Image (cartoon, grey):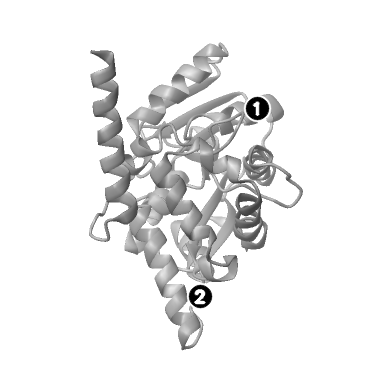
Amino acid sequence: MSKRAYSWRDLVANVGFLNWLFNPLQRSDVRSVYDLLLDQSPCERTRYLNLGYWEQAQTLDDACDALVRLVGERAGLEPDDQILDVGFGFGDQDLLWWREFHPKRIKGLNITASQVAVARERVARQELTQQIDLQLGSATAMPVAAQSVDVVLALECAFHFRTRERFFAEALRVLRPGGRLVVADIIPLPLVDAGRARWMQRGTWTLVASKFAIPKENAYPICPYQEKLAAAGFGQLRVESIRDQVYVPLHAHLRTHPEILARMHPLLALAVRLALKVEAKTLFSGLDYVLASAVKPGDA
């Protein structure tokens, strides 16, 4: 009985990965993508799915931790802070922020029920459910009272939101005056003038956007990104590209550490191997990666 059940689940997973990765007509929604990736973290000691920050990191786990730490440092997290983390994945980032920055409380929202269940269980095992409250909920319609949190964080997830501008508006609503917003985000690079490079930029962005459920409304580069934050009502804007410490070093690390791919579903590992045959400069030619921060006007 159990063997038949396992075989059926395996078949369903294979069909799901085939459709998502290799069917050009397939357009999966965000929940479906992350349901497929439920057991697919390439990390060894954590369950991160982020791309990592590689300025000093030597391992994938360390790079993922470094990105989380970078977001916390940019937000200036303090012991009295009430944090709202949207798109918290499997909860690794919240556990790190709790350990290293000691905030007063962390509330998390995530629309993927499978991730919420795993993250809540992991937090419960560490007896932190009173300090880290992870719930099913949307970043664009937050079940959170106005002016009730000090910091809103979105680590590698805002590109999914329909739309990012609605998320900015909700973040402004729930933040107290003087509250901070920090986002680590994937956006397209500004297009070059013409020729093959422009075609490659469009192609690489379109592929990523289609496979990872990025709405077309979120496909704008760094200057409009800053303008939309300002239009939402934020001040003290800082939006900088950190792509050179994300894409190229990750690509190099995966090329030299094939054991990482062995932790993935075979079809996902195949897709990554095929991608790694392409030089990083080409593979990521249309992608930027930004660290954005802003402050809600008013006295804290």
Residue at image coords 65%, 27%? 80
| Image point (27%, 26%), residue name | 7
Instruction: Pinpoint residue 48: horizontal percent, then vertical percent.
Output: 54, 36
Q: Position of residue 107 (x, y in %)?
A: 49, 28
Residue type, mark 1 in image:
Asp
Would residue 244 be seen by someone viewing this image from the given angle?
yes
Closer to the eye: label 1 or 2? 2
Question: Which of these two is toward me, 271 or 116?
Answer: 271
Would residue 200 appear left or right of 12 to someone viewing this image?
Answer: right
- Where the N terminus falls, by quadrant? top left
The residue tagged with tag 2: helix, strand or loop?
Answer: loop
Q: Is residue 232 left or right of residue 74?
A: left
Q: Amino acid at mark 2?
A: Pro
- Quarter-wise, where is residue 210 in the image? bottom left
Q: Which residue is mark 1?
A: 80
Q: Position of residue 187 (x, y in %)?
A: 48, 62
